[in-house]
Image: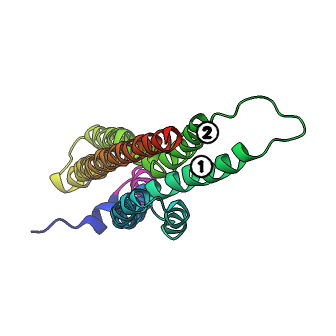
Amino acid sequence: MGLDLVQIFKDASIIVQIITVMMMLMSVFMFYVIAERLLTFRAASDQSIRYVQALGEFLRQHKVNEALQAANHSSKSPVAKVMQSGLQALLQGREALTTQGPDDVGDFDLVDSVNRALERVKERETANLRKGLPYLGTVASATPFIGLLGTVVGILGTFQLLKGDEVSIKEIGPKISEALVSTALGLGVAIIGAMAFNYFTSRVENYVIDMNDVSSEFIDYVLREGRG
């Protein structure tokens, strides 16, 4: 005989039903976050690969404006967004070195200006990449305990039935079932949430490494250009 989850839900107490609905709603939003992050990371990966390949060629040919235009057209790539800020800082810095304001404050450090622009955007892009991940972590850590709460309530209902003189298995069975199903549901949601959280966290770390590597290489380029 198959497991009739609908009937088990109907036979459950109101508290267990509320707990079950809450976990199902959490799981629905969890799958939404997973799907959204998968699509976002896929687009970011594709655009980042193409942009990094183009960026190297642009910088070898000293085509800073072209590199900036390519970054503007790669709006889903965190690497391109970081480089967009750095390239803009480089162009603005070069212009600043050729002019002097009415209240000049001293020597202008082009490398420091570019580096600060890169760091600002790296922090923001890292935060954007982590969007939704705290929720996955919360689901992974909280749903086992929520399911356990449903189990405890179900077991308490079973003990209430056992107070009677004669209790059949048909009366005890639904209470035991709702207790076990609640735990299983909580564990199932938690396992998926934990796996997704760890996977996306590793992807974010890889993107951070890519942004750091490209930024470091760009700073080297700015230093070489300044020495030249």
Between 212 and 93, which is closer to the camera in this rendering? 93
Q: Is residue 214 left or right of residue 1?
A: right
Residue 76 image position (x, y, % from top left) = 47, 64
Residue pictured at 80% horizontal, 30% vertical: 105
For residue 90, the mark is: 1
| Spot occupied by residue 58 in the image (x, y as percentages of width and height) | 42, 62
Instruction: Give, as a three-letter code, the residue at label 2.
Output: Leu
Label 2: which residue? 110
Q: CA distance from mark 1 to mark 2?
A: 7 Å
Residue at figure coordinates x 72%, y 46% from the top left: 98
Please name the residue shown 90% across and 39% down the image: 102
Looking at the rendered structure, the secondary structure element under dot 1 is helix
Quadrant assignment for the N terminus:
bottom left
Vertical placement of 42 versus 106: above or below? below
Q: x, y (%) of residue 112?
A: 59, 34
| Depth check, front residue: 206 or 56 | 56
| Label 1 close to label 2 by CB (< 8 Å) | yes
Q: Is residue 190 above or below residue 34?
A: above
Query: What amino acid does circle 1 point to?
Result: Leu
**Which stretch appears magenta?**
12-24
Task: Give coordinates of residue 131: x percent, y percent.
Answer: 49, 51
Q: Main secondary structure of the magenta part?
A: helix
Say whether disc 1 or disc 2 marks the residue closer to the N-terminus: 1
Q: Is residue 31 visible?
A: no
